[in-house]
Amino acid sequence: MYKDIKKLKGLDKIREENFLAFSAIADFLNNFPKLITSEIIEEITGGVPENHEKIVSTFLGAALCESEAESKLLEREYLIKSVKQLSASDYRENPFFKNIKIPSVKMGNWDLGYQSYDAYECFIYDDIDVLDNMREIPKIGYFTEEFSFPTVFEDGVEWMAIKPNEIETMKPHIAKMSGDVCVFGLGIGYFAYMVSEKTDVKSVTVVERDPNVIALFEKYILPQFPSKDKIKIVKSDAFEYAKSIMVNEKFDHAFVDLWHDASDGVELYIKMKKLEAKNSKTEFSYWIEKTLLSSIRWQIYDGIVKQIENGKFDEPYEKILMYISDSYLKNFVKFI
C-alpha cells in the first residue's frame, strides 16, 4: 500500500470539494446570476450602505446547494475567500474604458456593442487562486450599481469585453511587458492599448487571423490610440506565425489570448507552449493560465493515482504536490 495514502485521500477530498464548488458556482452563474437584487440586500440590511460580501457569501452558499452541509462547506472553504464587492467607479477610471469610445457597429459576423451587469449580479472577475493544499478558489464579484461595458460579439456570442474579468486577468501580464511585444489575439484591442501606453514598450505586434476583426479595430478603435504608431497588425494564424515567422523577429515578450475559456483553451494552450522552444528568447504569458492549468492538474493527478494503484509509484506525497503544482505544470505541458 502507498505509504502516504492518508494524505492522498485528503487530496482526493479537496479535489471533490473543488469540483463541487466549481460545478455549483458555474450552474448558478449560467442560470441564476441575477438572483440577488438590490431589493433583497436592502431588505436584509435595512438599507444600510456597507460592504455586503458576507451577506452575499451566505446567500450564495444557501442558493448553490440543497444540502445544508454542502452549503456551509462552500461558504466556509470557498465563498468567504471568493466573493468581492467591486467598485464601478474604479473600473470606469481604467484608461481604455475612460478614453476609448466604442460605437455600436457590425462587420461580417462581428459586432461591437455593450452589455451590462445589474446591481448585485454575480460574475467571475479574475483567475482562480490555488492554495498550497490545491484548494482552488474561484473569484466571484458584484457591483452595488448597474455597470455597462463595451463588448465584441462573434455571431451574437461574447468574444471579449472590457469588464472586470478581462481587466483583472490581464493586469499582471500588462505589468511585465516591456521592449518589443507580440500579442496573439486582437479582440477589442484592450491589451494592445494598455501595453502601448507603457513608456518601456517600444512596439506591439498583434497577430490576428480574422480580417473583419482587424477591419473593425483599424477603422473604429485604433485611430483613438495615443500611441498607435507603436502598433502593427499582422493577419496570420497564431500557430503558423509562432512556428515560422516569429522565429525571425526579436520579441522580448509575447501574450497569448486565443480562447473563450478553459473549455476551448487547454488544447490551444498546450499547442502554443510547445512552440516556446522555437522562440527561446521571448518570455511568453498566457491569459487565465491558472484556470487552464487546473484542468491539466487533475488529469496528471489521475495518472499518478493509477500508477500508485499498479504499484509503480512510491515517491512521497510532497512529490505529488510538486508534480501537480502550477510552476511544475507550466514546463511539463511543453512535453505532453
Image (cartoon, rainbow, N blue to C red):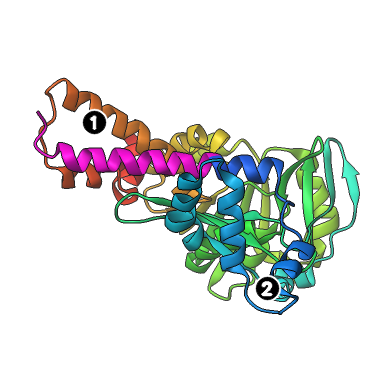
Location of the C terminus (image quadrant): top left
**Image label count:** 2
Q: Is residue 234 left or right of residue 14?
A: right
* Rendered image quadrant of residue 201: bottom right
* Residue in the image at 73% along x and 38% along y: 210
Read off the residue under disc 2: 87
Q: Residue furthest bottom?
A: 49
* x and y percentages locating residue 29 in the rendered image: 65, 46
Cα separation between marks 1 and 2: 43 Å
Q: Is residue 135 above or below residue 295?
A: below
- Amino acid at circle 1: Ile
* x and y percentages locating residue 140 in the rendered image: 58, 57
- Amino acid at circle 2: Ser
Pick the residue in front: 204 or 195.
195
Read off the residue under disc 1: 304
* Rendered image quadrant of residue 56: bottom right
Q: Is residue 135 left or right of residue 246?
A: left
Helix, strand or loop for the magenta stretch, by majority: helix
Q: Is residue 176 above or below residue 60?
A: below
* x and y percentages locating residue 227 in the rendered image: 70, 70
* Residue in the image at 13% along x and 40% along y: 4
Query: Can residue 258 be seen?
Result: no
Query: What span is colored magenta in the figure?
Result: 1-23
